[in-house]
Image (cartoon, rainbow, N blue to C red):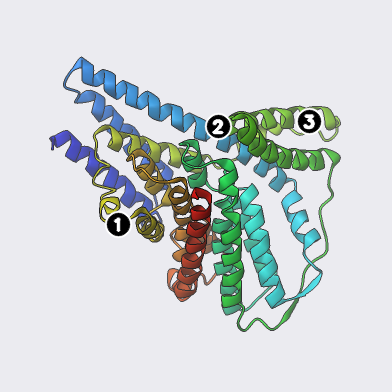
Amino acid sequence: MPMIDVVLIALAVLALLGVIFEESIHVNKAKTTLFFGTLSWVLLFLFSDSPEETELISSGLAESIAEIASLWLFLVAAMTFVAYLNKKGMIENMIYLIMPRQVTERRLLFLTGLFCFAFSSLADNITATLVSCSLILSLNLELKKRLQFIVLVVFAVNSGGVSLITGDVTTLMIFLEDKVEILTLLTLAIPASITVFILAVFLSGGLNGTVTLRATTNDVRTVDAVIAGLFLLTILGTIAGNALFSVPPVLTFLFGLSIMFLVSRFLSTDSDLDPILEYIRVIEFETLLFFLGILLLVGMLKEIHALESFVAIYDVLPPVYANYLMGIFSAVIDNVPLTAALLKSGISMSPGEWMGLTYAVGVGGSLLVIGSAAGIVAMSKIEGLTFGAYLKYVLHLLAAYTMGYAGVIAMGALINS
């Protein structure tokens, strides 16, 4: 192996370690991955042996940039919608409108799981986790009960995101590579929702009290209600447009975003005119830069043909077992680089097996609190939620994940037949 390839692989490993130990080294993972991702491509150009090789590297970089641009634009549009609705209190209003005023702790656990599952399908799992954490903290529960709620929240938001391209980045990545169809993805909601319910049953022990939720809600402007409806229509239009006419999801969401801008301009009065373009600036650009760095790194690894050894497990085990293990592996390593590497490696699988991988990498990170963005966010918000405290529930989580994966495989078998 050429020395430059060894150096580049070492840079990718350093970037991965930076992601895993982000909390210890106090360097944001977006900064780490972007630095190593761009540096690796610069080195590829600097140590090119011939003009022909330089041209191949340029072509590979252009391909990676095009894929990243499509992902970025889709996420910017979706995250702008969510940032606006969250800022206007629409999401918080929705919670307190659908939740009963007084409810038992056990029933609230099930309702929380249902809300997290449904909401994370439409929005990103970070927003769903933040909203759920605010709800849990307002209940003043004792630590053990609070942990039972938050464990379900982490699993539910990750489970909800796998069936819609708006809900989870790994699902979107797999879809954009034409590995699954948008309508078959929707079938993942059936086994995923059932296992959220099963996990709620596992976690409901000892929840015998009654809680009272506050009934106050924020005032809703007409323009905010219209934009909330537009967000739902954009999601439905994305699904229908892609299924019926093969319209790229990024185009539909950008169209919805443009209508959002016009709606805000013409439905707002002079007194409440809101500079809606400002909401693009408050979305999580750290997350977007992290995806940029990761995809640049994985594109580089593909360029030097280093991904073949990464997927050697698929040469040893059938995809149905290898995908299951990849889900468990995603609890230790971030699922975005894991998914990107698998997509770039050229693995050949049936649509049903790709569905299994979609579920595995989307939900497997729930097994450890550090295995998903939802878990990391929950740790920062819920006092007493530590790695060890969350680990006590790992058998419950593993059982739910395994049952969900088995359900997805069964669903995939029906689709393949």
User: How far apart in space, not on screen, are marks 2 and 3 (Cα)?
Assistant: 20 Å
In the drawing, what numbered circle is on residue 168?
none
Q: Position of residue 394 (x, y in %)?
A: 45, 72
Q: Are marks 1 and 2 in contact (CB under 8 Å)?
A: no
Label 1 element class: loop
Residue type highlighted by circle 3 = Val
Query: Foreground mark, 1 or 2?
Result: 1
Rendered residue at 37%/56% (across/down): 326
User: Which part of the image, by quadrant, shows the N terminus?
Assistant: top left
Camera-side residue of 361 and 380:
361
Rendered residue at 25%/24% (across/down): 45
Camera-side residue of 21 and 301:
301
Q: Position of residue 226 (x, y in %)?
A: 80, 39
Label 2 element class: helix
**For marks 1 and 2 on the same chain, the one whose residue lies earlier in the sequence:** 2
Q: Is residue 108 above or below residue 38?
A: below
Instruction: Read off the residue under disc 2.
Output: 73
Farthest top residue? 51
Q: Position of residue 376 (x, y in %)?
A: 49, 58
Query: In the image, is 215 to the left or to the right of 364?
Result: right
Query: In the image, is 40 to the left or to the right of 164?
Result: left
Q: Position of residue 354 (x, y in %)?
A: 44, 48
Rendered residue at 80%/68% (across/down): 100
User: How far apart in space, not on screen, are marks 3 and 1 (Cα)?
Assistant: 53 Å
Q: Is residue 340 above or below residue 414?
A: above
Number of other residues with Cα within 10 Å of mark 3, as a class: few under 14, some 14 to 19, many 20 or more: some
Residue type highlighted by circle 1 = Leu
Residue 89 in view, yes or no:
no
Instruction: Read off the residue under disc 3.
Output: 263
Rendered residue at 41%/58% (across/down): 327
Instruction: Read off the residue under disc 1.
Output: 317
